[in-house]
Image (tube, rainbow, N blue to C red):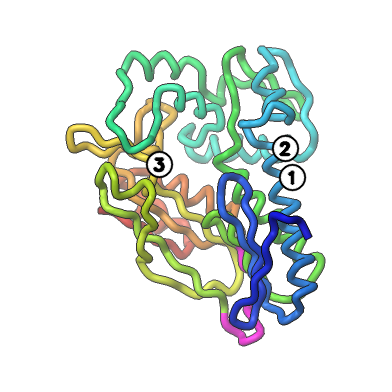
C-alpha cells in the first residue's frame, strides 16, 4: 500500500483516501474485507496518478507539454489522448463553441482569487486571438496547434479519471463501491443493504469577497445514488468581486468574459461521471437558460442560484 494512501473503517464499509489532481480523493468499498479494500483503493490511486501525470498541464514531461510546445508543427498522439481529443471536439460542436479546450489561455488575464482585478477589454481581446478549436487541425492521430495556442484537458480529465478507475475496480470485484475525486463521483451498484450511497449536494457560500474562498459550503440537500455518475460545476471558490458585481470563473470562450447570470452551481446525475460533467458544465455556460437546458436532458439535476 502506498504511503500516501490511508485506509479507514466506516459503517460496514472501508474507505481509501489519497490526494490527486489537486483534490482530496476517496474510494468507499462496501465490504468487511480490509485487504480487498486496500487493493481496490490502491488500483484507484494508481489510475488517478497515471492520468494526472499524463494529462496535467502543470508538468513538463507529458503529452500535454509536448502538444503545447509543438510550435505549429504536427504532432502524433497516442490512442488514449486521441480519444480525449475526439471527445473534446464533440463537446465543442454540441456546445456551439462554448466548450473549448484551447480557452485555458484566458487565465493569463483572468485570475479568480476573490479580489477585484478585472482585466481591461483590450487585454481580453488580445488573448482571444490565441484560442478557438476551429483553428486547430485535428486529423487523428495528427494534431497541429497554431503557434501560441495551447490545450487544457482539465475540464474533462477528473471525470474521465473517475470513470477509468471505476472500470478497473469493476473488473476486480462485484462489491459495491463509490469513487469520489474532489466531488466528481461514480457509484457501481446498490450496497449490500439494497440501498445506495448517500450523496450531499453542496450549497455555495454567500457572494462576498471573503466567505467563499476557504470556508466549506453547507449542504443544500442529499440524495441516494445507487448507480451512475455525479458531477458539479460552480463558482463557489473562484470568482472576482468588483463594484458589487460578481464575476464567475465560468468563462465564455466566444467572448473571453464570464457567462452572465450563470448559476452558482449545477449538479447532474448521469450514466457516467464524464457525461454528468459535460452536462453540468454546459448548463453553467447557458447562464439564465441553465434550467431550461437541463430540463431537456432527462437527467436528475440541481441548479442553485443566489
Picture coordinates of residue 250 (x, y %)?
Answer: 40, 39
At 72% across and 25% down in the image, what residue appears?
139
Residue under label 2, please give it. 54
In this view, which residue lies farthest toward the front? 3
At 57% across and 14% down in the image, what residue appears?
148
3D distance between C-alphas at marks 1 and 2: 6 Å
Q: Residues within 10 Å of mark 3 (few under 14, many from 20)?
A: many
Query: Do tag 1 and tag 2 residues touch (Cβ < 8 Å)?
Result: yes
Residue under label 3, please give it. 285
Quadrant of res 59? top right
At 43% across and 62% down in the image, what residue appears?
301
Residue under label 1, please give it. 50
Quadrant of res 90? top right
Look at the image and give the residue range highlighted in magenta.
186-195
Q: Which structural element holds mark 2?
A: helix
Q: Earlier in the sequence, mark 1 or mark 3?
A: 1
The answer to whether 89 appears left or right of 286 in the picture is right
Query: Do tag 3 and tag 2 residues touch (Cβ < 8 Å)?
Result: no
Amino acid at each position: 500500500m502506498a504511503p500516501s494512501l490511508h485506509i479507514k473503517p466506516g459503517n460496514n464499509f472501508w474507505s481509501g483516501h489519497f490526494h490527486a489532481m489537486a483534490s482530496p480523493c476517496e474510494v468507499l468499498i462496501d465490504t468487511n474485507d480490509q485487504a480487498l479494500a486496500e487493493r481496490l483503493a490502491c488500483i484507484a490511486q494508481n489510475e488517478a496518478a497515471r492520468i494526472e501525470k499524463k494529462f496535467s498541464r502543470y508538468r513538463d514531461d507529458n503529452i500535454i507539454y509536448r502538444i503545447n510546445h509543438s510550435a505549429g508543427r504536427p504532432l502524433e498522439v497516442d490512442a488514449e489522448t486521441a480519444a480525449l481529443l475526439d471527445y473534446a471536439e464533440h463537446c465543442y460542436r454540441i456546445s456551439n463553441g462554448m466548450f473549448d479546450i484551447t480557452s485555458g489561455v484566458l487565465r493569463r488575464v483572468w485570475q479568480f482569487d476573490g479580489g477585484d482585478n478585472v482585466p481591461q477589454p483590450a487585454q481580453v481581446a488580445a488573448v482571444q486571438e490565441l484560442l478557438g478549436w476551429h483553428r486547430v487541425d485535428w486529423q487523428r492521430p495528427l494534431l497541429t496547434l497554431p503557434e501560441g495556442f495551447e490545450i487544457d484537458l482539465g475540464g474533462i480529465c477528473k471525470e474521465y479519471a473517475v470513470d477509468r478507475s471505476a472500470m478497473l475496480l469493476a473488473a476486480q470485484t462485484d462489491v459495491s463501491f463509490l469513487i469520489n475525486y474532489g466531488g466528481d463521483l461514480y457509484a457501481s451498484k446498490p450496497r449490500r443493504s439494497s440501498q445506495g450511497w448517500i450523496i450531499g449536494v453542496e450549497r455555495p457560500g454567500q457572494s462576498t469577497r471573503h466567505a467563499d474562498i476557504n470556508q466549506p459550503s453547507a449542504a443544500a440537500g442529499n440524495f441516494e445514488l445507487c448507480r451512475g455518475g455525479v458531477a458539479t460545476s460552480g463558482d463557489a471558490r473562484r470568482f472576482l468581486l468588483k463594484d458589487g458585481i460578481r464575476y464567475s470563473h465560468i468563462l465564455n470562450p466566444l467572448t473571453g468574459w464570464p457567462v452572465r447570470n450563470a448559476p452558482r452551481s449545477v449538479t447532474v446525475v448521469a450514466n457516467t461521471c464524464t457525461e454528468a460533467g459535460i452536462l453540468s458544465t454546459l448548463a453553467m455556460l447557458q447562464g439564465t437558460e441553465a434550467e431550461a437546458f437541463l430540463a431537456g436532458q432527462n437527467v436528475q439535476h440541481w441548479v442553485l442560484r443566489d
